[in-house]
Image: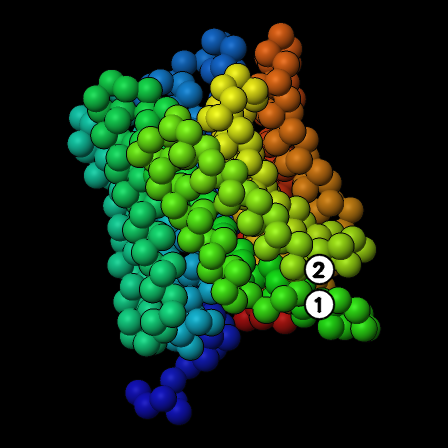
């Protein structure tokens, strides 16, 4: 088939006669990821109080951490990349049963980890790691075929994220508390760096596009200039130190410096002008948790007992990861289903529920006397945020717009 006669993305999706959820990469992974984020927390809250025991080989805290980071976030990364990479490369997206097979591979990982107590650890790791490995192979093929070399860095961060998952499984197989191991830190560090790199492109870009329609005024500084590269380099150094020597004063100092630099980076993106549109403002709020998490972790390392390491870490885990993924999922779903790029009241409520979860979890480290109640509040906020996304955006993800139905 010649280039002139090659099908377009729209033609390829119209030709598909199966379920609408398999017409584009964001559909199964955003919906499945949100449902899993909600269900995992529904299970975690009674696990925390000792009322539920799951047949997993992981200790309860490690299962919770693994399924939020590598389970939920793994799905959202797949949905984002399988939607963005065709735009980057000019190649057609993967649709239909091939997309469905990849989604089932992700689901197999969730199930095998859930029932891992009766399975060999190597088998559990192999099934769970099959998804990120296959995803990386698919993305690498598209980037290489499209000669989109500038985005090889994204592939590298995806590989690091998968490596962190493998390290997590190794920590768990050794009988360690994997949630406190190097694998968790490596995977979370890769996720934070992804937000720094990809968020550092899309936040100023989407902000500029929106502000350009609003008349004269300050516009975001163009991304990836010298200052941005310096801020990302310092963040990378801080993250690597955090993986290798998590309590060393040098790690704390590097993270504090990274936090300061990324606050300055965020200030260059004119976020103060976006308060009238939550769909844009939330991108800035989500990115703010990158420096806030770095500052909190750095402060906890330098002054132990200030916040508690787990509470500080949740500014990245629930704040940066949770809110940025919600921001991207809501915007991408609206944009790719032909909706107006504006946040309605339900979407604002979803964002607010997630912020309640983040700050309640942080407060649990500050006031340990009421930590249980704050954990329950944090869990409720998380369930409300992702359950709300599945409810409000599910109709867009599970059905095609009327004009596109056959």
Residue in the picture at 65% in, 29% down: 359
Residue under pointer 1? 219
Q: Is residue 102 visible?
A: no
Question: SS at mark 2?
Answer: loop
Q: What residue is rendered at 66% in x and 65% in y?
A: 220
- Quadrant in which residue 38 is drawn: top right
Vertical placement of 359 versus 104: above or below?
above
Q: Residue at x 47, y 15 (%)?
A: 47
Which residue in the protein does label 2 denote?
A: 270
Q: What's the mark number on residue 165?
A: none
Q: Nearer the viewer, residue 398 or 297?
A: 297
Say if mark 2 contacts mark 1, CB within 8 Å: yes
Locate the N terminus by quadrant.
Answer: bottom left
Rendering coords of residue 264 (x, y %): 62, 52
Q: Residue at x 56, y 62 (%)?
A: 202
Check the image and report above or below for 170 versus 192. above
Q: Position of residue 300 (x, y in %)?
A: 51, 25
Residue 261, relative to residue 352: is it above or below? below
């Amino acid at each position: 088939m010649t280039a002139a006669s090659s099908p377009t993305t729209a033609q390829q999706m119209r030709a598909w006669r199966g379920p609408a959820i398999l017409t584009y990469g964001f559909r199964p992974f955003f919906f499945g990821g949100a449902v899993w984020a909600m269900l995992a927390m529904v299970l975690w809250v009674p696990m925390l109080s000792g009322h539920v025991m799951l047949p997993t080989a992981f200790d309860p805290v490690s299962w919770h951490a693994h399924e939020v980071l590598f389970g939920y976030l793994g799905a959202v990364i797949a949905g984002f990349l399988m939607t963005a990479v065709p735009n980057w490369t000019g190649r057609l997206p993967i649709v239909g049963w091939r997309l469905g097979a990849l989604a089932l591979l992700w689901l197999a990982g969730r199930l095998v980890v859930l029932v891992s107590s009766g399975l060999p650890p190597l088998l559990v790791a192999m099934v769970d790691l099959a998804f990120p490995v296959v995803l990386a192979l698919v993305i690498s093929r598209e980037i290489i075929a499209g000669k989109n070399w500038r985005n090889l860095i994204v592939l590298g961060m995806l590989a690091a994220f998968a490596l962190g998952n493998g390290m997590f499984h190794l920590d768990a197989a050794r009988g360690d508390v994997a949630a406190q191991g190097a694998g968790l830190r490596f995977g979370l560090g890769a996720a934070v760096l992804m937000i720094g790199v990809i968020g550092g492109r899309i936040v100023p870009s989407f902000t500029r596009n929106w502000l350009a329609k609003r008349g004269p005024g300050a516009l975001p500084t163009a991304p990836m200039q010298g200052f941005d590269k310096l801020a990302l380099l310092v963040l990378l150094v801080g993250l690597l130190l955090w993986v290798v020597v998590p309590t060393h004063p040098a790690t704390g100092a590097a993270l504090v410096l990274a936090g300061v630099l990324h606050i300055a980076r965020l200030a260059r993106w004119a976020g103060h002008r976006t308060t009238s549109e939550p769909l844009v403002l939330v991108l800035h709020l989500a990115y703010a948790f990158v420096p806030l998490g770095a500052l909190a972790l750095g402060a906890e390392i330098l002054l132990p007992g200030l916040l508690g390491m787990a509470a500080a870490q949740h500014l990245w885990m629930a704040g940066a990861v949770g809110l940025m993924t919600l921001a991207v999922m809501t915007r991408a779903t609206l944009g790719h289903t032909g909706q107006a790029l504006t946040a309605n009241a339900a979407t604002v409520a979803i964002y607010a529920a997630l912020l309640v979860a983040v700050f309640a979890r942080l407060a649990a480290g500050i006031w340990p006397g009421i930590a249980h109640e704050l954990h329950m509040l944090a869990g409720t906020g998380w369930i409300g945020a992702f359950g709300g996304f599945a409810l409000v955006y599910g109709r867009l993800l599970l059905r095609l717009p009327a004009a596109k139905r056959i």
